[in-house]
Image (cartoon, grey):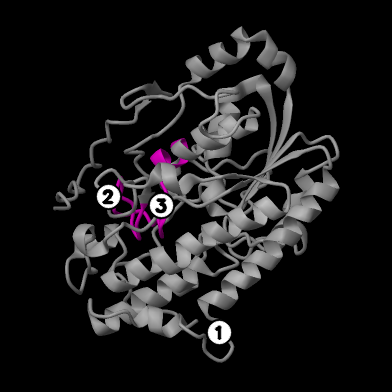
Amino acid sequence: MTRPTHLFARPLARPLARLAALGSAALLALGAVASHAVADPGLRRAHVPIRWAALGDSYTAGAIPATGARVPLGAPDEDGCLRRQYSYPEILRERLGPLVDLHNASCGGATIANVAETRQLPIGTHVPQWGLEDPDYPYPPVPLQLAAVSPGTGVVTVGIGGNTLAFVDILGTCYRLGLAGGNTGHPCRDHYASGLPGEPGIRERLATVAAEYGRMLDRIHRKAPGARVVSVGYPAIFPESAAASCTWGSAGTGDARGLLDFGTITFQDLDWLRHDVLEPLNAVVAEQSARHRAAFVDLYRSSRGHDVCSPDRWVDGLLSSPDPDAIALVHPNADGQRNAAAQVGTAVLGGLPGSAAGTLPEAGPGTPVAGLTRSSPPSAPPGRPVPAPRR
């Protein structure tokens, strides 16, 4: 793709390794989970330790500063996968303690092929199509994520598919087309309607996701024939009505607060992205899971009303709501990861969301966790104004 120029009218290559203010740390209550697990002898006998392999892309790894500090997980140096402290696997590692033996192989930028077919070259924070450069790029290849799975693995969770669809590239194209034409029409929908030479349309991309996803699940089953395999879908990212809840614009066009949402993607294209891209992607993952003996954790339903344009967002927009100087590029923040941990943790313990077996107790708003409270965003750093109210 052509690298955009003057994208946000401000430097975007700020060091993303700097920990962003965790304004909405959405975590499970450690004491409640630990006491619940240890006090139940049947649960302890049945589930200690569960050998768990967590596979996936940036929505699993955490990736952005709003989900905490990087977690190298024993590697001598940062490997470019951007696993973070408050990603849902790491939340559950902390909360479940000896109940699980977790191998977190998730990696930002991973495609379905990187799970079982092709070793990944991690990109770190190097996203040139959005004007971002990582001084440590390129990174050496990491093993196939399937290497984290063995015949003794009890549970495999996998959240993947968005990068095979090229979701970040699609958002970048929509941003540039909306910037060029203003907040009118659906230029991105038209661009991807049937595909261009060398660039498949959305239907073709979804068909590729379906074929590769099913093949990946079969390989996971072959590697760990006794494991419970759990596919994790994507949360609600786009609102039910963009015109009713989003702000359009960038630093040089429209309202600069739009960068906390989707920038210059038109409202009609945001509706298209929800209805014709994200929801079908989740449907493909759910369908392939049913066909290939995997459970499906639906994050979409539990996160509706907490999209990027919501005042109580669980997914940050182009910039991060806790720290407008931090890049988010439409990824879950700590609240979104907390919700995923609640849903996925239930499946790891042997149940499914909504079932009674192995249900994790919830941490309500304001519950203190590791010195943070979910309902209390930190003050802005000295010299940086608090963002104006959205509406």
Residue at horizontal 44 percent and vertical 30 percent from the top: 27
Residue at horizontal 56 percent and vertical 47 percent from the top: 61
Q: Residues within 10 Å of mark 3 (few under 14, many from 20)?
A: many
Residue 91 picture location, percent across and down = 53, 32
Q: Which residue is mark 1?
A: 199
Task: Establish if 198 lies above or below 262.
Answer: below
Q: Earlier in the sequence, mark 1 or mark 3?
A: 1
337 in magenta: yes
- Magenta residues (range): 316-338
The residues bearing labels 1 and 2 have C-alpha atoms spaced at a distance of: 32 Å
Task: Establish if 372 lies above or below 190.
Answer: above
Q: What secondary structure do most residues of the magenta stretch adopt?
A: loop
Total numbered labels? 3
Could you tell me which secondary element the residue under label 1 belongs to? loop
Question: What's under tag 1, amino acid-wise?
Answer: Glu
Question: What's under tag 3, amino acid-wise?
Answer: Ala
The residues bearing labels 2 and 3 have C-alpha atoms spaced at a distance of: 11 Å
Residue 233 picture location, percent across and down = 54, 50
Q: Viewed as shown, does residue 278 lie left or right of 266?
A: right
Q: Are marks 1 and 2 in contact (CB under 8 Å)?
A: no
Q: Which residue is mark 3?
A: 236
